[in-house]
Amino acid sequence: MKTFKLKMVEIDEKQIFIIVQKAKETGSIKIGANEVTKAIERGIAKLVLSATDVSPAEIVAHFGGLCKELKVPYFSIGNKSELGALVGIKSTTSIVVLDAGSSKKELEVMAKEIFAKPKEVKEEAKVEEKKVEEVKTETKKEAKVETKKEAVEVKEKEVETKEKVVKTKKEAVEVAEK
C-alpha cells in the first residue's frame, strides 16, 4: 500500500480507493482520459486518478498541470488493471470523480489538506519555531541558574578562605603580642 506525501500531508492509497468506490456507488464518476480532460477543463472534476503504466505517458501528462491550476486533487496511482477493477471494468487509464456522493466530506478534507495555503503552513511553522525558542529560552534560564549557583558557591568559598586568612592573621598577631 502506497502512502503519498504532499506538503506535509500523508494520504493513503486505500483512502483514495475508498473515496472512488463510494463516489461510484452514491455519486458520479467518468472513465477515460478524454472524459477526465473535459471534466477538469469544465471545472467539475473533484478528484482525478491516472494509472502509472499509461503508454504513451503523454495521454495523461497534462492532468497534473491542469489539476494543480484548478486545485483538483490528482494522483498517479495503481496500474490500468487496478483502476479498471476499482470501477468495474477491465482497465482504464484514468478516472475522474464528479460527485463524491457519500464520501464528499472525506474528499473535502483531503483537498483542503493538499491545497493548504502557504500562509497556513507558515503559521504552523511559526508555532513550531516559537515552541523551539521557548525550550531554548527555558534551557538558557536553567543554565543561568546553574551558573549563578556555581558563582555563589565560589563566592562562599572565597569568603571562607578570607575568614581563615583573617583568623590566621589574628592568631599571628596574638602570638606576636605575647
Image (spheres, rainbow, N blue to C red):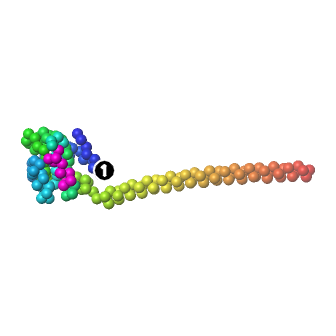
Residue 101 vertical position relative to residue 54 in the rendered view, above or below: below
Q: Residue furthest left?
A: 89
Identify which residue, 82 or 53, lies in the foreground. 53
Q: Which residues are magenta?
A: 57-67
Q: Verify whether residue 161 appears in magenta.
A: no
Query: Where does the image place residue 146, in percent across and percent down from the top left?
Result: 57, 51
Q: How many marks?
A: 1
Taking the spot 46% from the left edge, 53% from the top edge, the residue there is 135
Main secondary structure along the magenta-highlighted residues = helix
Identify which residue, 77 or 8, lies in the foreground. 77
Q: Is residue 45 left or right of residue 131?
A: left
Residue 22 in view in this figure: no
Taking the spot 11% from the left edge, 55% from the top edge, the residue there is 38
Q: Residue furthest bottom?
A: 119
The amino acid pointed to by label 1 is Met
| Residue 14 lies in quadrant | top left
Residue 44 vertical position relative to residue 86 in the rendered view, above or below: below
| Residue 148 lies in quadrant | bottom right
Query: Where does the image place residue 108, in percent across and percent down from the top left?
Result: 20, 55
Residue 28 in view in this figure: yes
Q: Residue furthest right?
A: 178
Residue bearing the label numbered 1:
8
Q: Verify whether residue 64 appears in magenta.
A: yes
Identify which residue, 122 or 70, lies in the foreground. 70
Query: Where does the image place residue 53, in percent across and percent down from the top left?
Result: 17, 40
| Residue 42 lies in quadrant | bottom left
